[in-house]
Image: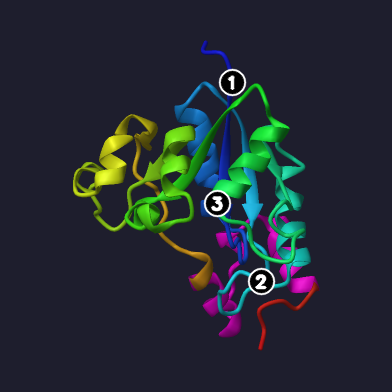
């Protein structure tokens, strides 16, 4: 068995967290024996995204699940400041907390296409591994070849071996809640009950 020396940062809005988020995290743990922990990092409410629920609710919903899994944890690192952190800043803060660990950053191929435009992009791809999930028939190898920066650091870009098994999204779940449809089996029961008790996503 490989030494578990890697921590994977999984950032997102988690608005709300659904089964596919936790399924992806478990898939990473299953495929990469060196991965010790998945850190879910919900974005700050100040992040410019329509309909983003308050920090407290999104953090609480994640914590309901991560507290029950020794390989999952949730961090409010991005929620504490007056602005949403740049990805490189988040990774640097996580590295300070896990000094002896390798830090990988989990993204979709849609984000990989834009990564070269991110703040301190070269520093990000040179210092950290980027674990990429292929989406919407994207070809990661083609994305890398077509981009000078990504091509320079292609050894730091890792393609998730298996395709993502579920494509439904938090956006879909929110739309169903607004239509007063059941979303019970699209998310963990604890999250479902939390949303129901707090009357979330109902306009």
Residue drawn where x is 36% and y is 53% of the image: 116
Residue 72 bears which disc, if any? none
| x and y percentages locating residue 155 in the rendered image | 33, 29
For the residues labelled 1 and 2, say whether their Cβ atoms are less than 8 Å apart. no
Residue furthest toward the top?
A: 1
Asked if residue 134 is positioned above or below residue 85 in the image, the reply reads: above
Question: Is 199 displayed left or right of 101 in the figure?
Answer: right
Q: Secondary structure at mark 2?
A: loop
Q: Secondary structure at mark 1?
A: loop
| x and y percentages locating residue 89 in the rendered image | 61, 48
- Report the residue marked by disc 1: 5
Who comes first in sequence, dot 1 or dot 2? 1
Residue 62 quadrant:
bottom right
Residue 87 bears which disc, if any? 3
Q: Residues within 10 Å of mark 3 (few under 14, many from 20)?
A: some
Who comes first in sequence, dot 2 or dot 3? 2
**Is residue 194 located in the magenta-colored stretch of the structure?**
yes
Residue drawn where x is 66% and y is 79% of the image: 201
| x and y percentages locating residue 69 in the rendered image | 70, 37
- Report the residue marked by disc 2: 46
Q: Secondary structure at mark 3?
A: helix
Task: Check the image and tell me how it is coloured.
Answer: rainbow
Is residue 180 visible in the rendered structure shown here? no
**Is residue 186 located in the magenta-colored stretch of the structure?**
yes
Residue drawn where x is 54% and y is 41% of the image: 25
Specify start and end residues of the magenta stretch as a single range.
Answer: 172-197
- Position of the C terminus, as image quadrant, is bottom right
């Amino acid at each position: 068995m490989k030494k578990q020396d890697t921590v994977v940062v999984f950032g997102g809005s988690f608005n709300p967290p659904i089964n596919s988020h936790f399924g992806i995290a478990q898939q990473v743990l299953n495929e990469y024996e060196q991965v010790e922990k998945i850190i879910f990092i919900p974005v700050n409410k100040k992040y410019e995204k329509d309909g983003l629920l308050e920090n407290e609710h999104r953090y609480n919903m994640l914590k309901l699940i991560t507290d029950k899994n020794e390989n999952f944890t949730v961090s409010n690192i991005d929620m504490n400041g007056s602005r949403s952190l740049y990805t490189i800043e988040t990774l640097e803060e996580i590295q300070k907390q896990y000094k002896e660990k390798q830090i990988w950053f989990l993204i979709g191929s849609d984000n990989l296409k834009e990564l070269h435009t991110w703040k301190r992009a070269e520093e990000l791809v040179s210092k950290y591994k980027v674990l990429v999930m292929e989406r919407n028939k994207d070809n990661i190898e083609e994305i890398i070849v077509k981009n000078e920066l990504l091509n320079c650091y292609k050894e730091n870009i890792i393609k998730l071996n298996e395709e993502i098994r579920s494509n439904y999204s938090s956006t879909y779940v929110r739309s169903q809640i607004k239509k007063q449809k059941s979303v019970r089996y699209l998310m963990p029961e604890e999250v479902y009950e939390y949303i129901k008790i707090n009357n979330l996503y109902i306009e």
